[in-house]
Amino acid sequence: MCRYAMMVYKGHYACFNCQKTFKRRILKDANKDAVTSVEAKCPECGNLMANMGLDFESPAKNDHKQWAHIRNLYTVGITFHSCGCSGPGYIPQDHKAIISYLEKIRSDYMHSLVFWRYRIEPENKRERELDYQKNGSHLWTVSRNAFKETFSNQEGINYWIAKIKEVEERLSMIRQSK
């Protein structure tokens, strides 16, 4: 268990307009019955701020290039969320790295799509068990109940086509932002 799990941390919110960050507690911290957090507005300009996560470190206010990069990361869904112990994972360091990162994700998704296109669907319980033993990671990614239910190839294909489309939209956004 995370040794910091019992502590309440304030999330880091960024205002790209003012190029400033603010820490703020989420509504759930103040009201245990709350379901979601309220949108955070910048105290300076009133625009909505971006929830960048616990591990976000703000660039200098006058570092316009780095602020543009942080905005690009946020635009394509890359933030600094984690429990605070292990960090947010890989964060691309420049525009080209964001594109390479998203292209790698798309490539991985395409390989998963190929699996679903050529998978032989099980026809009975025994075949489903063997399929799960052999292809459990592919099945688990698409359905957390893969062992208990039959998941059709078409459902897997639809899942990966949707994921590829999401990544391609993110790639399009980042390419247009240059």
Image (tube, grey):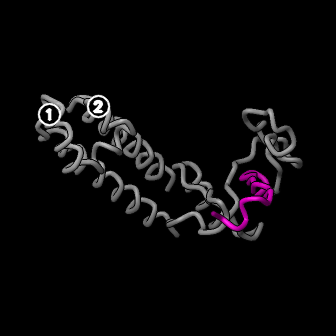
Whether the residues at callouts 2 and 1 have beta carbons within 8 Å, the answer is: no
Q: Position of residue 54 (x, y in %)?
A: 70, 60
Give 136 or 111, whichever is nearer the viewer.
136
Give 20 or 83, whichever is nearer the viewer.
83
Position of residue 39 in the picture relative to residue 168 (left or right): right
Considering the whole magenta stretch, tell me its main secondary structure: loop
Position of residue 75 in the picture relative to residue 96 (left or right): right
Bounds of the magenta segment? 1-20
Question: Which residue is found at the position 29% from the left and 31% from the top?
Answer: 158
Give the residue type at disc 2: Asn
Query: Local crowd at mark 1 within 10 Å, few (<14), some, or many (≥20)?
Result: some
* Res. 19 image quadrant: bottom right
- The tag earlier along the polypeptide, 2 or 1, is 1
Give the residue type at disc 1: Glu
Mark 2 secondary-structure assignment: helix
| Separation of marks 2 and 1 at Cα, in angstroms | 15 Å
Query: Residue 158, labelled with which disc?
Result: 2
* Res. 22 image quadrant: bottom right
Query: Residue 121, labelled with which disc?
Result: 1
Say if 132 sits above or below 156 in the image.
below
In the image as oriented, which residue stretches furthest toward the front? 126
Is 2 a magenta residue? Answer: yes
Which numbered mark, 2 or 1, is in the foreground of this view?
Answer: 1
Give 2 or 172, whichever is nearer the viewer.
2
Is 134 a magenta residue? Answer: no
* Res. 12 image quadrant: bottom right
